[in-house]
Image (cartoon, helix red, strand yellow):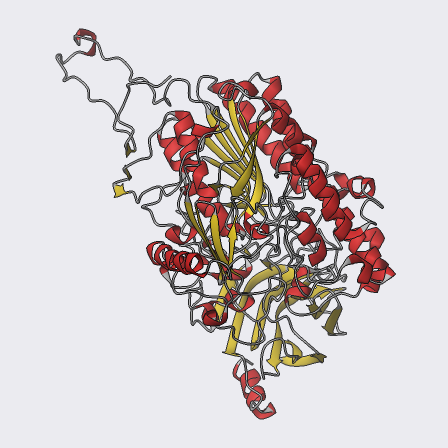
Amino acid sequence: MRDSGPNRNNLPIEGRGHAPATSIDAREQDPPYQPADPLRPPEGAPNVVLVLLDDMGFGAPSAFGGPCEMPTADRLARDGLRYTRFHVTAVCSPTRQSLLTGRNHHSVGMGVTTEMSSAAPGYSGIRPRSAATVAETLRANGYNTGAFGKWHQTPARDVSPAGPFDRWPTGEGFEKFYGFLCAEMNHWYPALFDGTVPTEPSTTPEEGYHLSEDLIDRAVEWVGQQHSLKPDVPFFAYLPFGATHAPYHVPKEYREKYRGKFDHGWDRQREITLERQKELGVVPQDAELAPWAEGVAHWDELSEEEQRSAASLMELYAGFAEHTDAQVGRLVAALEESGQLEDTLFIYILGDNGASAEGGLGGTLNEHRYASGIPDSPEFINAHDDALGDETTHAHYPVGWALAMNTPYQWTKQVASHFGGTRDGMITHWPNGISERGGLRHQFHHVIDVLPTILEAAGVPEPDSVDGIAQQPVEGTSMLYSFNEADAADRRRLQYFEMVGNRGIYHDGWMAVTRHGTPWEMVQTGRRYFDDDVWELYDTNVDWTQARDISAEHPGRLHQLQQLFLSEAAKYNVLPLDDRMTERENPREAGRLDLFGDRSTVTFDGPGLRLTEETAPNVKNRSHTVTAWVEVPEGGADGVLVAQGGRFGGWSLYVHEGCARYAYNYFGLQVHTVADDEPLSPGEHEVRVDFSYDGGGVGKGGHASLLVDGTRVAEGRVDGTIPYYFAFDETFDLGVDRLSPVTDDYPTADNAFTGRLRRVRVDLGDDLCSDSDSEAEREQFRAAHE
């Protein structure tokens, strides 16, 4: 199967030399020059498809005993292998960086998400060039490479038209990319990139658009093109879905299919799931349900309103999961129809972390609202039952369902200490490479093991150097040894885990862990000290689910493992530990560079620019001024001048029915509007809003003054502002409000300014104005920009 061709250890592979010219006339060249053979992967190298789902726990998919029907996963598992002890990092960006590099997440700078990165080496959010991705390696060995979906690995400050683009997907080994670069995305109105070019869908939800369907459309088209044009060249297709991360957006019929299916509640669901898991053999017959998380109500402790709201949100999630799997099925069908499925190594990872508890104890219709400390009541959720899953909701289920979706393990996403945060189902399917059908594999493995598995299957070595950069060791271990040897001894005997201070160390079945934080407490109210954390000890050789803490019985073993964790932490850049969550989304708080740095004034020319929140001027928690210079044609003009965020939180400066307006949308709960009552006359105008922040901390209110040509025409009070994040899946836009609208004064689409927008300037005051700021001082700020 393996060739004796070119040296593949140093990439790119050098072309072979050529003989010297023997004649002046090409017709007399002896021997005549022949074209060089194109670079090809080793003989027998398969196609590779790598699918990654988001925020799905071990106990959610039907292939691992869960209540979410996922026929494609079931089929691939029936004809392939289920891995029952496969682990991820407990949060998305770190898992994705580890998946593509084969190194531990701190080794490649991704100790947390890109939006929470800092200056510390293990948390910089910047992949070192000494850790080439699997796509770089395969492409340099002759594969065609394409990625479709959620990336979430590019440094946040680089996601703008100014780049740099070297750590975008097309700079990290993918010839084709179509998807998004941030933490999550609105599946009805997404902000996408085609390569490095911003794009939006050409159809609407009313016309049948959905992001997951769009991604598969693009992937199927790309795979078909590769097969038509280069049938002898294998491809690598990476499909990291935005689903099943919030917001739960899904066609209504998928949600309705599950109506009433979760009325029995999360406690009973855990029991049902464990029974199914034992029937499937994905857990041992003596496996126990791990302890329930303290502080989370049992189902029979909820009111009828609470039970109804919780059940409806779970119905929505299950429909979202099944819909996503159905799209994967369309890709499988396309591969089968073209005759490629038999020789495609298909790896289906059912979650980049455990199920998410970030919707809070009661669930929410707007996860950003909850992340800022504002919960939704069950009555409020039930009042919007018919809308669940549509573009007006940004839903997330409650903690109880996250715990149930991680059955039989304890805890959730973020909690790297316990399997509920780190253990996910994984399926491999490769008929030409795996002899057993429907097999189970119980070897202990980690997401860093995927890269070496793919390379070994392709017959490609781990490179010693890439583009002249010596490569740091691949820290993963290939799983290929287990493909055709069910009882092979584990080759991964040691693995550390860490996420926002939650820690664990696994060694030969023994595991010492400490949970540092509570995942649904997104905003810290006081400092937690690492020395106060309580360590637990489990022998997973006999206690598969971490159900029985035996630390008191084996203090010596616990101490040894604690010391081993410190050794691994020092080796892989885990230290210093950092437990900040929402606070680190502020670059100054986190200690990282952002695009604008200390600039207090930013000027943009003309309309059309689209920026992410991390690359837009940060107007939160500070006084600021936004000024737009416009030309109004005869007959007047309407539309958006500049906007940030959308339906679930943001602000907009716009013209409505000819009149200048400013709107501040507070988490979708209240829209404060300041409006002129005189239309703008034809000609040139300066439209400005001065926002004077109250100060005294984050999320406080302020006073908005609207000025036209230097004259104050309206003013109003904004009672509270958004402290941390408008939305991961919305944008800062010039001349239009893309995606969802900040205000109902203009439509979702066709809201571009119909006059001419010449330029926009944003002036920023000091961060976090204090209570001592007087009205006179705030007036001085306004006057300085008049």
* The one of 325 and 755 positioned closer to us in this rendering: 325
Vertical placement of residue 238 versus 729, above or below: above
> In this view of the protein, can residue 395 be seen by the observer?
no
Where, by quadrant of the figure, is residue 451 drawn?
top left
> In this view of the protein, can residue 306 be seen by the observer?
yes
Residue farthest front in this picture: 553
At a point 69% along the width and 34% down the height, the residue shown is 279
Percent x, y for residue 449? 44, 39
Percent x, y for residue 128? 35, 50
Percent x, y for residue 99? 46, 42
Vertical placement of residue 737 versus 377, above or below: above
Percent x, y for residue 551? 50, 60
At a point 79% along the width and 52% down the height, the residue shown is 265
The reply, left or right, for residue 330 in relation to residue 229 is right
The reply, left or right, for residue 504 in relation to residue 460 is right
Quarter of the image where the C terminus is located: bottom right
Vertical placement of residue 716 versus 110, above or below: below
Quarter of the image where the N terminus is located: top left
* The one of 612 and 394 positioned closer to us in this rendering: 394
Where, by quadrant of the figure, is residue 150 drawn?
top right
* The one of 749 and 73 positioned closer to us in this rendering: 73
At a point 52% along the width and 73% down the height, the residue shown is 528
Q: Report the label total.
A: 0
